[in-house]
Amino acid sequence: MTTYKNIKGIEIKYLSADPPAPNAGQVWYNSTSKVVKGAINGLVANGTWASGGTLNATKGGGSGSAGTQTAGLAHSNRGTNTCELYDGTSWTEVNDRNTATEFAGTFGSQTSAISATGQFPSGDIANVESWDGSSWTEIADVNQARISMGKATSIAGNSLGLLFGGGPGAKDETESWNGTSWTELNNLNTGRRHLSGFGLSTSALGFGGETATAGNVNVVESWNGTSWTEVAEVNTGRQGGSAAGDSNTLGIYFGGGSNLLTEAWNGTAWTEVNDLAAAKNEGSGSGTSNAAFVVLGTVTEEWTVPSFTTKTFDTD
């Protein structure tokens, strides 16, 4: 028999069914199942993917996205410049990007985003454009034109950002955006293209991708605002994956190649969690570890972590 302290005198709710949305820490007695239950904060491991709204125009490999699951942005498709906004249910076409591109690094919010560099029609461009919620404006170019780079997927806006790696070849350069100009910083330890990333300009994670000679790699590097440090590898090395996350300690990595895989990072290790419904090679994703979206073609998938998890207490 389990040993536990006597909690006589503490009142808990006596319910015939679990409450639909309990607060974390709430405890109750379910009279139907005759057990004591409680609610704990939602866990990334319990997140799932579901179908979202259908895009009006195809967003193929190399499209860009920014924002959140309920206020998102997606643009471009292999050399086109179309742009759409998402409200969590449907997509609406808005003003196009000025310069068509693909494989750009895009970050920010639905009303304040940056789309940097990429390729059009076949050569790399240093072009950068800023989105203000209604139109795109060309701003200061990056120092290193590149494609298929990693990015810190901050959803805060267009005043801060980070780009790293990319092609052609397997670049290792890092550039930081301060709202006015780009500054070259310390390089990645392992140059890669088609890599993924999430986080902030001062706290980011870069992972996966391929090198110029070794193909897909499992390498993961953490950025502290000054330098990159190698940390625990992803379980499955792949290129062309998408990502969403909050900092270099919390996020998710999904798709890439023919993979349905989603892996969650907790600051120490990667754990495989629930798969995408369909493979997303070079899809474009944005959001947080708890609520994200990814687009490819005209399809949207949404990642959601429940706000609470019900736990049954052992009272043997």
Image (cartoon, rainbow, N blue to C red):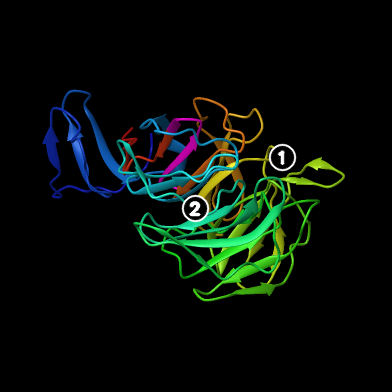
Which SS type dominates the magenta stretch? strand
Location of residue 46 with respect to 96 vertically, above or below: above
Q: Residue furthest top?
A: 32
Number of labels in the image equals 2
Range of the magenta residues?
A: 288-300
| Residue 207 in the figure: left or right of residue 250 | right
Please give the residue where the numbered disc 2 appears in the rendered image: 245
Residue 224 visible in the snapshot: no
- At 55% across and 35% down in the image, what residue appears? 60
Residue 284 visible in the snapshot: yes
Location of residue 55 with respect to 80 vertically, above or below: above
| Residue 239 in the figure: left or right of residue 49 | right
Q: Amino acid at mark 1?
A: Gly
| Residue 165 in the figure: left or right of residue 97 | right
For marks 2 and 1, the one nearer the N-term is 1
Crowd class of label 2 (few under 14; some 14 to 19; many from 20; radius 10 Å): many
Please give the residue where the numbered disc 1 appears in the rendered image: 237
| Residue 212 in the figure: left or right of residue 287 | right
- Mark 1 lies on a secondary structure that is loop
On the image, the x and y values in percent for residue 47 come to 42, 37
Residue 16 covered by magenta stretch = no
On the image, the x and y values in percent for residue 148 come to 66, 49
Crowd class of label 1 (few under 14; some 14 to 19; many from 20; radius 10 Å): many
- Mark 2 lies on a secondary structure that is strand
- Give the Cα separation between the discs numbered 2 and 1: 19 Å
The residue lying toward the viewer, choosing from 7 and 235, is 235
Q: Amino acid at mark 2?
A: Gly
